[in-house]
Amino acid sequence: MTVHTMTRAAAALMLLALLGACHKDDPGEAGPAERAGRKLDQATDKAGRQLTDAAHEANQQITDAAKETSQKIDQATNAAGDKLNQATETAGKKLEEAGEKMQAKAKEREAK
């Protein structure tokens, strides 16, 4: 046998082996390619569901963080407003006291 003939025989045997692997015993049974396709579809569906779940979870975390930040901003704004009101009241009282002192001094000058 020559090398060329042996190569052809090996190729023919490989072809027969491949065809034998693709042969379905039962016509109603799925072949290897169809089974592989189904597994690929299942894996794709599972990955899609996992991505959707992860997106929903991330969205919920972002929403929760936004609410928390908004509440903190409201608290800080209210605290600053309270401090401003206290400062305004204190300044008003001091201004009133200064006005009273000025009036008292003016009365003292008029009395002299």
Image: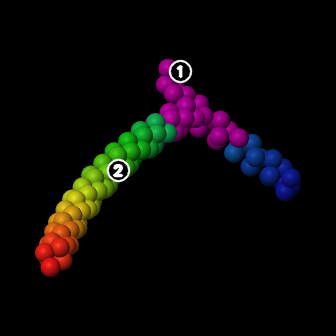
- Foreground pick, 61 / 37: 61
Label 2: which secondary element? helix
Instruction: From the top left corner, tell me how far across and down residue 20 is, in percent.
Output: 61, 36
Instruction: From the top left corner, tell me how far across and down residue 4 is, in percent.
Output: 86, 52
* Boundaries of the magenta span: 15-43
The nearer-to-camera label among 2 and 1 is 2
- Foreground pick, 93 / 33: 93
Residue 106 falls in which quadrant of the image?
bottom left
Q: For residue 38: magenta?
A: yes
User: Can the viewer see residue 67?
Assistant: yes
Q: For residue 29: magenta?
A: yes
- Residue matched to label 2: 66
Q: Earlier in the sequence, mark 2 or mark 1?
A: 1
Total residue callouts: 2
Residue type at the position of mark 2? Ala
Give the residue drawn at x 81%, y 47%. Answer: 8
The quadrant of the picture occupied by the C terminus is bottom left
* Side of 35 relative to 9 (left or right): left
* Side of 91 relative to 51 (left or right): left
The secondary structure making up most of the magenta span is helix
Give the residue drawn at x 69%, y 45%. Answer: 14
* Side of 13 relative to 37 (left or right): right
Residue 97 falls in which quadrant of the image?
bottom left
Residue type at the position of mark 1? Pro
- Residue matched to label 1: 27
Which residue, as the protein is rendered here, is positioned at the far front?
112
Instruction: From the top left corner, tell me how far across and down residue 88 is, in percent.
Output: 24, 62
Q: Crowding at label 2, few (<14), some or many (≥20) Cα neighbours within 10 Å?
A: few
Q: Is residue 84 above or below residue 7?
A: below
- Foreground pick, 106 / 81: 106
